[in-house]
Amino acid sequence: MSNLEKRIRFASDLARKAGRLALDYYKDIGALTVVSKGVQDMATEADINTENLIRQAIEEQYPQDAFFGEESNETYEPKAEGGVWVVDPIDGTQPFISSIPSWCISIAYIEDDSVRLGVIYDPCHDELFVAGKGMGAQNNGKAMSVSPATSFAEGLVSVGYSNRVSPDATLLPLARLMTENGMFHRSGSGALSLAYVAAGRLIGYFEPHMNVWDCAAGMLLIEEAGGRAINFFDNQDYLKKGGLVVGATKGVYPALLAIVEG
């Protein structure tokens, strides 16, 4: 078994373990304390404790690697000898605290500005989406591929919203999508939506701004499932600044990028 295969197995097992913890909190939502980090940006002890579980496991197994998580990114320190694990303990916190089963655990490993593995786990539906660089993508152990769609009329494009940019950055592309006979979908979890593109359930996804912990795993899933994703990692400060995310089937990607960029 290669080093990458070992990391994938480790990340997969860890995502399931973290998912079980998060699911326990989800089943008792009323007992959670919700804290606002900004407009439409929430956190609970479920987010924090789930991230702590993931972080501790990674630090024990791969002490040479750095850790960059949504709830603790201010403490990030790069390490010269290893890569960096990028983690969103609960992507879709708003659906989570609203008792909507549209959230997930997202874990990615980045080395030399390249995502080497991506794991997204949906505990509510027990779906584990896994990809390794150059190794394809799977859902619960079965190979998956993007939809064969080549036009907006052939499926749903999921849309994300970010309050870090102007509303027009979402609304104008959305209007152009509908003008071109497309239809939109929104789940509240960008990571899960990207996994759905990889699984062939959606034909594309765009969000004007995403943080790396939201999208790194999902974009690798799309690419390894035969789709295309924007070169998010071209920006040398992608860890701290984030950026535009577009991912889709190969046939839909050029048109989706065009309506997003205007």
Image (cartoon, rainbow, N blue to C red):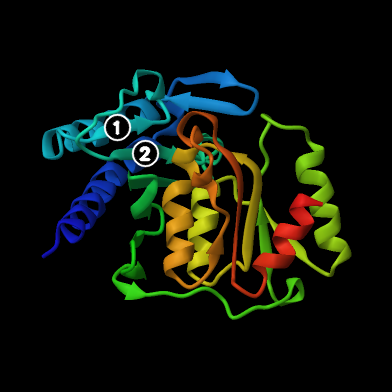
Residue type, label 2: Val
Q: Secondary structure at mark 2?
A: strand
The correct choice, above or below, for 47 with respect to 15 in the image is above
Q: In which image quadrant can residue 135 be found?
A: bottom left
Image coords of residue 84 (percent x, y): 30, 38
Residue 210 left/right relative to 80: right
Residue 84 or residue 141, whichever sits in front: 84
Image coords of residue 42 (percent x, y): 53, 26
- Residue that mark 2 sits on: 87
Q: In which image quadrant can residue 48 be found?
A: top left
Binning the other alpha carbons within 10 Å of mark 1 as few (below 14), some (14 to 19) or many (20 upward) gives many
Q: Secondary structure at mark 1?
A: strand
Q: Quadrant of the N terminus?
A: bottom left
Q: Is residue 102 visible?
A: no
Residue 67 disc label: 1
Residue 26 disc label: none
Question: Mark 1 and 2 residues: CB-CB less than 8 Å, in contact?
Answer: yes
* Residue at (69, 66) in percent of width and height: 254
Residue 166 left/right relative to 200: right
